[in-house]
Image (cartoon, rainbow, N blue to C red):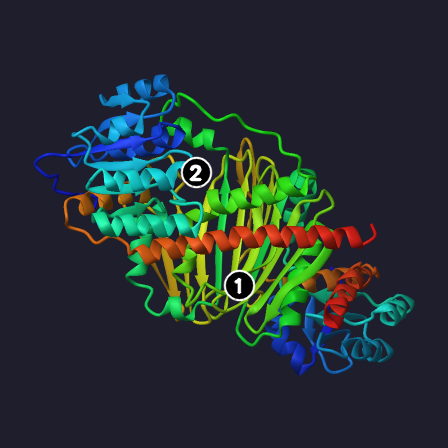
Amino acid sequence: MSPQLSAHASPAAEAAGAVGSVLASLPVSLGPGGADADIRAISGKPGWTAEALAAIAGGARGLVVVEPAAEDTAVLAAAAESAGVPVVLDHRWASNAAVDGAAAAVLELAGGAALLDSAAAAAPHTDPELLLGEHLALVFRIAGGVQDLHIISSGPRGYTAAGRLPNGAPVALQGILTRALPGGVRLDLLTADGGVRISVPDPDTARPAETTVTTPSGATTLPTIFESAHRTSWRRLTGAVAASAQTPDLPGFDHLSSTLVRFRRH
Amino acid sequence: MTNNYLPPAKPLGVGILGAGPVTQAIHLPALARLSGLLEVRHIMDVDPDVAKSVAARVGAASSSSMDALLADPGVDVIAICSPHQFHAEQVIASCLAGKKAVLCEKPFAMDASEATRIAKVSAKTGVPILVGAMHTFDPGWLAAESAWGDLPATAHTIRSSIVLPPNSRFEDFATEILTRPAAGSPDYSDLEVVKGMLRGGVMGLAIHDLPLVRRFLPAFEDVEVLHAEIVQPFGYVISLKAGGRSIELRAAMTATWQPEWTFEAIGYDAALHIEFSPSYVQAGSATARITRNGTTTTYGPYGHNGYEGEWRKLAELANGTGTAPSAETLINDLTFALDIADGTAAAATAAAALAEKVPA
């Protein structure tokens, strides 16, 4: 068993990432620490890359970034690799452990895709760019690249975006701000004769995502995983620290970040 | 909501114009559940063999002439299930023939002037008209309507999503189909084909739920289609706004066995979610959920679907016990659908022009 790592969260990261609950659920792997803890959690609000660089310079052995905003991560990625510090980006939905199964199913069926339709719900007054970023993180994680992605409309009640899968099938994304629905996202990939549906709840509880794969022979529900996206992120990080391994998170974030920056300019 | 009714002493006689798959697989099975209230007495189709064969299933007379059916004294109410382009003239003729009520499949006209003509004839003759927007007669929808309170005034986002297998899958569950229209092989690279498919998608599929959408719009005259594209082999993705609402229309008809037909109206504090049963099969009503203040209330499912609901309503109207929808409502529903159909063509044209300008 790996030795226990100390962990510390900034107040903003604690609020956004439910760090206390996560640490309580990983009591052997992680223990409370101070500002010089082995693993540090920072909020992904604008300026997070500078904060992350400072944490690496200050001796952190691993970083969790909760819901990162669009920023250039090139300098951070180089510093993290040079220092051997793994960085995990803790996304609201994309980090859910069930997403792997859905992504694998989509990969298998995407050649016959007819439509990708996804709707995300979040509380009113949620930053629309944050919501869109978290939504796209999930879509990119599951479906890979989306071509010709563009915003159809956006405003205080949400947004609509459209794009295209590599085979030309339409992609339709919608963000909806409401208190009436639980926060979460649903993604449907419809294919010529079936499809994949995943519904991912917010990570404030361990309520499991639900994934169904439909083929001509029937529908299969993938095993439920009662673990919040936050806890999954921390487990990934402790594993990477123990293995002295880097994660693919920062390189994978480039496309999402540049997409959000492009939308911001328009 | 109850599935029971007290049949009148003598059932109303039904005449049906058009004996295609919708008549065979939807209306005749629905009417079979209402024997004692309604009785099919005459079926007309331009193909006399089809008319005769379908009529024989229910012991009705047959003809290949609308005039013969309208002249049949046993026919009290008319159902118009012919191709769209014949609807207006057949509705008008049915009213002028002095029938007790008319049910016309959607759309009941192809443009607003036709709709206005129909409304005038209906007003002059006093013959009530129903348009077969079946979901508006679904007990699940009606139960939700009685409970949703101020949601039509507060919903900011409306979504209609339809995923269906080919019609034949459910037609074959409902009946033994005599004839089917031939399927085509569209050229998806042809803009005119795309525009035609979008119009067909709106007027043939989305139109089922556009009256439901309009129920949540304070105004619809300012409808603006923001985005429209087809889904292959048939379907659409349409984004629009009207009356200050965001409206998303999705449809995909694929080879899946798994149907899903949902309608959602979402506001900051309340949301409606309805799942409708597929057409053709007698699978009962929609199930509606209304969520407000963290509490979700479910309505249904009830014992019959919207098609049976519209026949029950037609019988009420013919017996003088119900209120017909206003002509304004019918015309506005049609105008809304036509405006969206026109808007999708414009959006598809604009998207194609933009794609030509952008280097690959």
Res B201 seen here: yes
- Quarter-wise, where is residue A185 in the image? bottom right
Q: In this view, does A215 lie to the left or right of B153?
A: right
At a point 35% along the width and 53% down the height, the residue shown is B330
Q: Determine if marks 2 and 1 fall on one subunit.
A: yes
Q: Marks 2 and 1, Cα distance to the nearest angstrom?
A: 28 Å
Residue pointed to by mark 2: B85
> Circle 1: is it few (<14), some (14-19), or many (20+) Cα within 10 Å?
some
Q: Answer above or below: position of B85 versus A188.
A: above
Circle nearer the viewer, 2 or 1: 2
Res B303 seen here: no
Q: Answer above or below: position of A4 versus B249.
A: below
Residue pointed to by mark 1: B241
- Quarter-wise, where is residue B335 in the image? bottom left
Chain ID at mark 1: B
**Label at residue A83:** none
Q: Answer above or below: position of A49 versus B188.
A: below
Chain ID at mark 2: B
- Marks 2 and 1 in Cβ contact (< 8 Å): no
Q: Which residue lies furthest to the right in this view?
A: A82
At a point 29% along the width and 52% down the height, the residue shown is B120
